[in-house]
Image (cartoon, coloured by chain):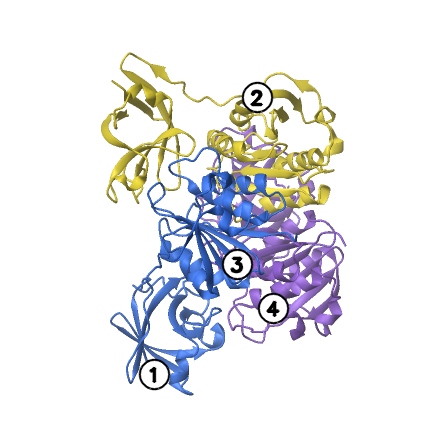
Chain colours: A blue, B yellow, C purple
């Protein structure tokens, strides 16, 4: 069996022992597994941000990767623990939406509840199912335990609400889905949506109540340092950036704000 | 020989080359070792926080793991470099208390000074024994060098002072031992200490001069969002939390503050 | 073939999916490679800081390590993508100086442009060559593809400007090259430069317009807690530190500030 990869996406931060405890559990059960951190710096309890981050990273991992995501404000309640078998990967975590975006983009084949105590730690805490339930499940899955052994198949999962794009004769309206560490403002408008603009090289936008005219660039440095621009980013979304600067810092924009593109 | 795990716990932070230098030294000597970060974000020079974090994480690692901890304000002085052979793991670091809590909880079998220059880098800096002494020691140990080869056996180590719990007919008094990244306030009162409360589901506490009555929950969401609660956390300690919020943020509590439980 | 190591040095930070995307690409192409993070917390766009950090860490890695560095404000422009074959290691990244310091310190043997699309992702974004060009190049190199297959040999690379040290009959003048997470102020004056002081144990310095007389110590704790000192740090540079404190915090010093040593 080739080496398996387990990825981790959490809001646990980097100063506490929690991430290491999950890795220790994985390596105790499945010593040859490679663990790759996606991030542990998701904003606390921000399921949507976790879902976005996992969905962005997961297409680049090899077939057979197991993705575990633990942003879990409902830990200890009746929210389900689930294992999603998708086309290329499996996903393990709480059924609160954090896995949904990534799993759906691959095509979901089966969903199972994780209920079999054989594949959990002996003692389950009230507050840390990442270590006690999800980490062992991921490790046993990496060891070749088949998904149906973890629990009964179910048909539905919780899905985070991302705005749909609405179209009029002159506009497309979407929203800001992420602001990255460089201050790039990432919208859910895609490269193909911009084809409506034809050959125009200026992007006409409204974000909340502010109108912007930005050069549509292929490189940040097509505008001077500290000047704003529009660019198709590395996940094919329209982004608003500042060359060698931070677009988000001096704007009032937030994730969830509406973005209107005047394409005509 | 199966793959060995070496864990790292330091106050080095994540922006400097120091952590990578230690990993490079380990992998140069012992290329097949798996390195797992516990954390590099211990507060600078905070030996007690390092000791707590290592002690929290180490029970979850497989037998045979080598734990290296470098919170080392006394680097370059006569403080000893030590190797502790405990029941399940070995511990390597400065003799200043950072290893003591974790090693004692496993049962210490032998303690050795690390003195043999054969198992150090050729050139020892004044300021970075993590790289020059501890990393090579951990790597050679992973390679199968036996503990007595590193130096003479000694019988005592420095131990950080953690408050003992004191009991009266109506109260237990302990202290706050950690505040985690979620703002959970972790006390040194344990699940079994709370058995004194009988079947009561309200926890009566005094932290410094503030009296609190908190619902003893099994899940954060048993109270409304932003409301405080008491819960037995994932290391079996009594914790004070806020559902989907941060208990520490708006309180004046600090590590070391006294906590009194009125159990009657 | 023994396991290859690929190191990563970036300004991507830890909250976004970008670092994981690069690792995913590496592991998809070269599943057995060990990836070691040097740091992802280089100040955004700070090529010089990236160059310093990589140069500090790389001497400790085993022969054959592949170092990838992506601080890349010119992504999408005509700045070259390069592969440097040096004496012990290979270096991959943008030709903007980030690789130069480390590569030169080892001795550069050959420099190649990375141009062969066979060793890139199929779809190249405008903004993320770390994932689309550099990560696959590093992975194919780890797989044994020979450097000339990546593109034509070139003879020159961009080199960051670090101040030379200037000498008078009584002074040496260098500069501050780094301030680390402990607040240690690291100059480019070396241990051997201090031999000019003879047996003197007090260091006479001017930083910008401030004169300092500091004890030259072999351990931080040779002065009292919170007191300043001079010490030869772990990379053989003269550093200004505060015992159990932070030298940079309360000073106005910055990277690039001049430092004059009055050695007589």
Q: Position of residue C58 (x, y in %)?
A: 66, 51
Q: Is residue B183 visible?
A: yes
Q: Which residue is mark 4?
A: C133
Q: Is residue C46 visible?
A: no
- Cα separation between marks 2 and 3: 42 Å
Label 2 crowd (10 A; few <14 / some 14-19 / many >=20): few
- Cα separation between marks 3 and 1: 37 Å
Q: Chain of mark 1?
A: A
Q: Which residue is mark 1?
A: A263
Q: Is residue B181 above or below residue B63?
A: below
Q: Which residue is mark 3?
A: A89
Asked if badges 2 and 3 are on one and the same chain, I answer: no
Q: Is residue A257 above or below residue B140?
A: below
Label 3 crowd (10 A; few <14 / some 14-19 / many >=20): many
Badge nearest the viewer, 2 or 3? 3
Asked if badges 3 and 1 are on one and the same chain, I answer: yes
Q: Which residue is mark 2?
A: B107
């Amino acid at each position: 069996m080739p080496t398996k990869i387990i990825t981790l996406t959490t809001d646990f931060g980097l100063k506490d022992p929690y991430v290491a405890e999950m890795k220790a559990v994985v390596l105790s059960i499945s010593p040859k597994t490679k663990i790759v951190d996606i991030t542990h710096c998701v904003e606390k309890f921000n399921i949507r941000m976790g879902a976005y981050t996992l969905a962005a990273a997961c297409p680049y991992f090899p077939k057979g990767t197991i993705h575990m995501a633990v942003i879990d404000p409902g830990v200890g309640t009746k929210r389900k623990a689930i294992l999603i078998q998708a086309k290329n990967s499996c996903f393990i975590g709480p059924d609160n939406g954090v896995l949904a975006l990534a799993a759906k983009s691959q095509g979901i084949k089966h969903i199972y509840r994780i209920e079999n105590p054989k594949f959990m730690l002996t003692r389950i805490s009230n507050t840390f199912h990442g270590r006690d339930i999800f980490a062992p499940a991921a490790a046993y899955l990496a060891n070749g335990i088949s998904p149906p052994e973890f629990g009964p198949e179910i048909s539905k999962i919780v899905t985070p609400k991302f705005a749909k794009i609405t179209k009029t004769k002159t506009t497309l309206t979407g929203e800001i889905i992420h602001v990255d560490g460089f201050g790039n403002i990432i919208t859910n408008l895609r490269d193909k949506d911009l084809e409506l603009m034809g050959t125009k090289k200026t992007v006409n936008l409204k974000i909340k109540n502010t109108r912007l005219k930005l050069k549509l660039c292929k490189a940040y440095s097509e505008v001077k340092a500290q000047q704003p621009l529009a660019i198709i980013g590395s996940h094919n979304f329209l982004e608003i950036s500042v060359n060698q600067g931070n677009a988000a810092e001096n704007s009032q924009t937030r994730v969830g704000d509406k973005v209107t593109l005047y394409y005509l």
